[in-house]
Image (cartoon, rainbow, N blue to C red):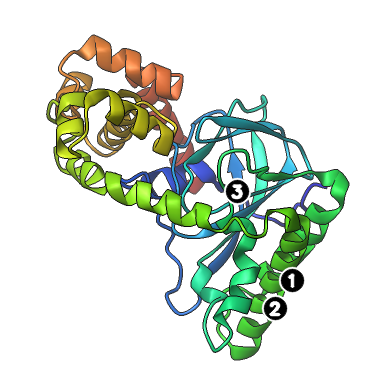
Amino acid sequence: MPLGSRVRWGDAYSIIEPQINADSVHVWPFPPEFPIDVRFLRFGPHGDIRMNRHDYFEVLFVSSGEVIYQVQDQYSSLHPGDLFLIGSTLLHRMSRYGARGVKAAVLYFLPDLVMGGDHADEQMEYLMPFLVQDAGFPHVVQAATGIPAQVFGLMKRAQAELPAVSSRARLSVKTYLKMILVLLVNHYAAYRGEEDAFERRQKDLDRLKPLFDLIDRLYHEPLGIEDASSLLHMSKSNFMRFFKQVTGQSFVGYLNRFRVAKAEILLAETDLSIAEVSQRTGFCDQSYFGLVFRNVLQMTPREYKHRLGHLRGERERLRG
């Protein structure tokens, strides 16, 4: 069910990756008075977005392409016409793209848009599929159920009203959103009553918050498992097990991915040499920096700089 040619596709990597902070939280720039957005994005094998989570809830419809979606340490296959939904506590990312990548429509919204008024318990029911997500939750709604096509139709109608500057447009968008949520509530009816999974996940993330803050401040300095476990008053073995359970990654893997993201910014926005970038992002050994960079982005730092230069040249040629 491909989208029409009138759709303007945004590059997901260049939009999302710079918005991911040290907590691995992707922060979307919603209008504060109406926090919902629908975008058409191109996810490609040219750049893997880091594992991330977000305060908003997300519904993604695959228009074309196939991909493996990773949630924590679990993997699911997505095919054209499938729907994927994710709440705010689980780290996730796309990986293992097909040769042409993926085109997808995404719906982002903050739960506050649905909550409010005198019937909070009743309104909370709309959010049930996002609050019960824990290990084993089936994040994919397959095309064969017919639900993704209905959701996609409502997403397109909501997108046509955005940005919702009038009260009529805001009412329309909220109505389309609630229609989507009712479809999902009915599909996941068997999971009702498991909402405490959300609170458990949030407590685990809150426990790691001091460590995320430390990484944000001192990622360019030596940081080891001993430092991290001491900060959280845990033994090394308990810390390593807990961190992997909460983030789906080892501490070293998480830290290296964060440092590589910082290195990407320096390579893109400064004239620093690769050796200088390596030092400034906490990689004391340039060879190790190159190895980690390649493992994360499937290209060397030098190839990354060359690709950036090529892209800049293409933009200038198109402007001319």
- How far apart are labels 3 and 2 at the CA level? 24 Å
Where residue 312 sits, quadrant-wise, is: top left
151 lies above or below 248: below
Q: Position of residue 68 (x, y in %)?
A: 64, 30
Mark toward the start of the polypeptide (1 vs 3): 3
Q: Residues within 10 Å of mark 2 (few under 14, many from 20)?
A: some
**Extreme-top residue of the structure:** 287
Q: Nearer the viewer, residue 121 or 283?
A: 121
Looking at the image, which is closer to me, 137 or 298? 137
Pointer 2 residue: 175
| Residue 256 visible to the viewer | no
Q: Are marks 2 and 1 in contact (CB under 8 Å)?
A: yes
Q: Is residue 74 visible?
A: yes
Q: In this picture, is 34 found above or below 248?
A: below
Label 3: few (<14), some (14–19) or many (≥20) C-alpha neighbours in 10 Å:
many
Give the mark nearest the N terminus, 3 or 2. Answer: 3
Question: Measuring 31% from the left and 26% from the top, which residue is drawn there?
Answer: 240
Determine the CA span between mark 1 and mark 3.
23 Å
Q: Secondary structure at mark 2?
A: helix
According to the picture, the residue beneath numbered tag 3 turns out to be 41
Which residue lies under the disc numbered 1?
Answer: 179
Q: Amino acid at mark 1?
A: Met
Give the residue at x 42% y 34%. Answer: 245
